Image (cartoon, helix red, strand yellow):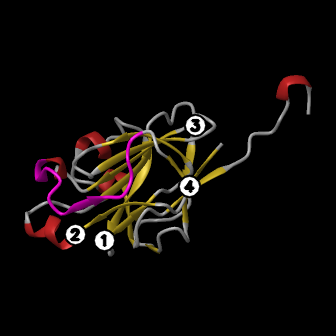
C-alpha cells in the first residue's frame, strides 16, 4: 500500500436481503421511477415477513416518519435506499413500527422496522420492497441473485459493489 492509501485495493461490499421473500427484477416493479432506474441500480424483494433489516452497515441518512423508506450512507460513500411497497407513503405510517431514527449508526442485520405486510396488501398497495444504490454511477453494482430466487434476510447477499 502506498502513502495515504493510494494503491489500496477497494474491497467488495455486499448488500444482504432486507427481508425474507422472493427476488423481483427492478424492471418488473410497477413504478417507473424504480423500474426505469431513475433512482439507481438494484432489485426488489416481494416480502414474506414483517421484519425489515439494514442490508449494510452505515449511517441512516434518512428515515421517513411513515416508516416506509430509509437511506443508509456506507463508510465508503455508497448511498443505499430501502423503500417498502409502492405508494405506501400514502398509508401515513399505518402498520409501520419504526425501530430506528435518522442519524443513527446501524450494522448490517439491525432491525429497521416491523410492518404489517398483509395490511399493506389489504389497502391495495404492492409490497415490492426496493433495494437500490442511488449513486450507482459511482458504485457500479452486480446483482447476485436472479428473479424468483427465495432469500432470507441477513443470510443472502443480493447485490455487490466496489
The answer to whether marks 4 and 3 mark residues whose Cβ atoms lie closer than 8 Å is no
Q: Residue at coordinates 24% horizontally, 56% vertically from top-left?
A: 85
Spatial separation of the CA atoms under disc 4 and disc 1: 19 Å
Above-or-below relation of 153 to 84? below
The mark that comes first in sequence, 2 or 1, is: 1
| Residue underneath mark 4 | 107
Disc on res. 139: 3
Split into 4 quadrants, where in the image is the C terminus?
top right
Q: Is residue 49 left or right of residue 96?
A: right
Q: Looking at the rendering, which quadrant does residue 65 occupy?
A: top left
Q: Are marks 2 and 1 in contact (CB under 8 Å)?
A: yes
SS of the residue at dot 3?
A: loop
Q: Residue at x 85, y 24 (%)?
A: 4
In the figure, is residue 101 to the left or right of 96? right
Label 1: which residue? Answer: 50
CA gap, disc 4 and disc 3: 20 Å
- The one nearer the camera, 147 or 22, is 22
Q: Which residues are magenta?
A: 90-102
Q: For the residues marked 3 and 1, what is the alpha-carbon distance in whole angstroms? A: 29 Å
Q: Residue at x 56, y 41 (%)?
A: 74
Numbered badge on residue 9: none
Q: Nearer the viewer, mark 4 or mark 1?
A: 4
Amino acid at each position: 500500500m502506498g502513502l495515504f492509501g493510494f494503491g489500496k485495493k477497494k474491497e467488495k461490499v455486499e448488500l444482504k436481503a432486507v427481508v425474507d421473500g422472493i427476488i423481483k427484477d427492478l424492471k418488473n416493479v410497477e413504478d417507473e421511477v424504480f423500474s426505469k432506474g431513475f433512482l439507481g441500480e438494484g432489485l426488489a424483494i416481494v416480502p414474506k415477513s414483517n421484519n425489515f433489516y439494514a442490508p449494510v452497515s452505515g449511517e441512516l441518512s434518512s428515515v421517513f416518519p411513515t416508516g416506509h423508506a430509509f437511506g443508509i450512507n456506507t463508510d465508503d460513500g455508497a448511498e443505499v435506499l430501502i423503500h417498502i411497497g409502492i405508494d405506501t407513503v400514502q398509508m401515513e405510517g399505518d402498520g409501520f413500527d419504526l425501530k430506528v431514527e435518522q442519524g443513527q449508526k446501524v450494522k448490517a442485520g439491525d432491525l429497521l422496522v416491523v410492518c404489517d405486510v398483509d395490511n399493506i396488501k389489504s389497502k391495495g398497495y404492492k409490497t415490492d420492497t426496493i433495494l437500490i444504490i442511488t449513486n450507482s454511477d459511482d458504485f457500479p453494482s452486480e446483482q447476485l441473485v436472479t428473479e424468483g430466487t427465495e432469500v432470507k434476510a441477513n443470510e443472502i447477499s443480493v447485490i455487490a459493489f466496489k
